[in-house]
Image (spheres, grey):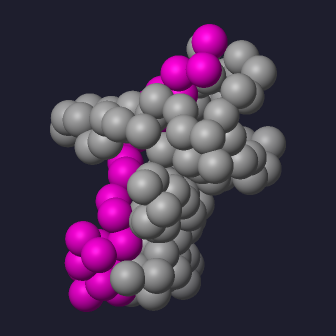
């Protein structure tokens, strides 16, 4: 496959800057796959699995929130959170899941508490799912 330039940068810093053959990410509108010579494109990121194919190697990550842009062949992924599958702390994700689940079953929880717990639960599920791709 023909490579393209991919940069992945989070608020914590640069995650990847190099050549890739394919990028698959979850946008708010669904999953998209980016290959070389993709049309210019901008999309908001959702919560899900990201796949980067570089040098024939396939790496999977949890990718949550942010933006994706393709401009003149250069692809920039600016997620709020991006964790490679082999770096995910599964115990921490499980603990977050349990805390969120407890709030969701609390009859005294406010609407705000419930919405925050739902988002935390979804993030934990994404991380746990992606961690299985190590």
Q: Is residue 119 visible?
A: no
In this view, the residue farthest toward the front is 1
Q: Quadrant of the C terminus?
A: bottom left
The one of 77 and 120 positioned closer to us in this rendering: 77
Q: Kindly identify the residue that appears in the image at 74 percent across and 46 percent down.
A: 32
Q: Is residue 92 magenta?
A: yes
Q: Kindly identify the residue that appears in the image at 61 percent across and 40 percent down.
A: 2
The one of 36 and 125 positioned closer to us in this rendering: 36
Q: Kindly identify the residue that appears in the image at 24 percent across and 35 percent down.
A: 14
Q: Looking at the image, how many numbered discs can be counted on the residues?
A: 0
Q: Is residue 84 above or below residue 69?
A: below
Please tell me in which quadrant of the rendered image residue 78 appears.
Answer: top left
Magenta span: 72-94
Q: Is residue 2 above or below residue 93?
A: above
Residue 16 at x, y = what percent?
Answer: 31, 42
The one of 108 and 69 positioned closer to us in this rendering: 69
Residue 111 at x, y = what percent?
Answer: 58, 55
In this view, the residue farthest toward the top is 72
Q: Is residue 90 magenta?
A: yes
Q: Is residue 124 above or below residue 94?
A: above
Residue 40 at x, y = what percent?
Answer: 71, 17
């Amino acid at each position: 496959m023909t490579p393209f330039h991919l940069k992945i940068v989070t608020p914590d810093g640069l995650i990847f800057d190099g050549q890739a053959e394919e990028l698959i990410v979850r946008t708010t509108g669904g999953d998209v796959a980016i290959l070389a010579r993709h049309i210019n494109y901008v999309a908001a990121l959702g919560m899900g699995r990201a796949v980067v194919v570089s040098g024939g190697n396939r790496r999977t990550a949890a990718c949550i929130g942010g933006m994706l842009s393709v401009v003149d062949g250069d692809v920039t992924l600016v997620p709020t959170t991006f964790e490679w599958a082999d770096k995910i702390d599964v115990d921490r994700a499980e603990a977050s899941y349990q805390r969120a689940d407890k709030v969701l079953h609390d009859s005294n929880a406010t609407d705000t508490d419930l919405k925050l717990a739902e988002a935390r639960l979804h993030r934990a599920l994404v991380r746990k799912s992606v961690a299985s791709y190590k």
